[in-house]
Amino acid sequence: MKAIVVTDQAAGTAGMKLVERPEPQPSINDVVVQVYASGFVNTELSWPSTWTDRLDRDRTPSIPGHELAGVVTALGYGTAGLSVGQRVFGLTDWYRDGTLAEYAAVEARNLAPLPDDVDFTVGASLPISGLTAWQGLFEHGRLRAGQSVIAHGAAGAVGSMVTQLARLAGAYVIGTGRAADRQKALDFGAISCSISSAATSGSGPRAWFESEERSCPSSDRSRRGLPTAWRSTSSSNPIAPN
Ligand SMILES: NC(=O)c1ccc[n+]([C@@H]2O[C@H](COP(=O)([O-])OP(=O)(O)OC[C@H]3O[C@@H](n4cnc5c(N)ncnc54)[C@H](OP(=O)(O)O)[C@@H]3O)[C@@H](O)[C@H]2O)c1
């Protein structure tokens, strides 16, 4: 099969090469997926797991990419819950060859069915950013309905997932981002107030998305912990600075 491999960590993305590799064989509890769409982030090239196995042995040439969407072509011994021909999406193990290839071997538990009306490219873009958002909101943040969330970069990969998941959970989402992204973030479900211009420089948020949908009461807990510059004032929503 065709695959992209890396062998030299110092070379970065310039070291990625398209080569012929053997097709992966499914281990126990694995499936083999024909990859229709794949997700890759260049930070993978600095992850130790891209270069070594769990015993710290060199595993190059390794195939990067850990998100995928495609169709199941083979089942490993004992694999249950998925069938050949099924559309799936999910994540491959950090320490195994990944998804920048025509086929990838994946543990069945790391895959989910991909609905017929969801494109493969959409399916492959979801797993890591979606999981990051889910873990932040529900595992670390223990978010509950009625609470408020600040999503920095609410129109970005993680921020858009944070915004949608938090809204589905019944939380209020205050988004930050560029003015050009405002409508996108509002469409994802962000609700916000305006912010003073002092907060638009440096590394702080560049703007608060504005919405008439909900006012931000001064008692809102999500705003109490914010630095003074991040607190907003607007005629409809007076928020007293510290
Ligand atoms: N994507 C993942 O799967 C993933 C997984 C784990 C961790 N992370 C981490 O999560 C963070 C976000 O990653 P991402 O993939 O979601 O990036 P992304 O798609 O580029 O989204 C980041 C968003 O934040 C905006 N932004 C940047 N600086 C800002 C500021 N000062 N105020 C308000 N908005 C600002 C960006 O706007 P512009 O594009 O207009 O600058 C962009 O819309 C990064 O730290 C990344 O390392 C990401």
Image: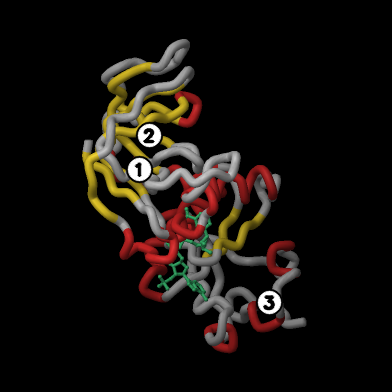
Is there CB contact under 8 Å for labels 1 and 3? no
Q: Quadrant of the N terminus?
A: top left
Q: Which residue is mark 2?
A: 89
Residue 136: x %, y % from top left: 62, 50
Which residue lies most toward the front here?
A: 57
Residue 167 seen in the figure: no
Residue at 46% across, 55% down = 44
Q: Earlier in the sequence, mark 3 or mark 2?
A: 2
Amino acid found under the numbered disc labelled 2: Phe
Q: SS for tag 3?
A: loop
The disc at residue 82 is none
Along the line of sight, the residue nearer the viewer: 205 or 58: 58
Q: Which residue is mark 1?
A: 124
Q: Which residue is mark 3?
A: 239
Amino acid found under the numbered disc labelled 3: Ile
Label 1 or label 3, whichever lies nearer to me, is 1
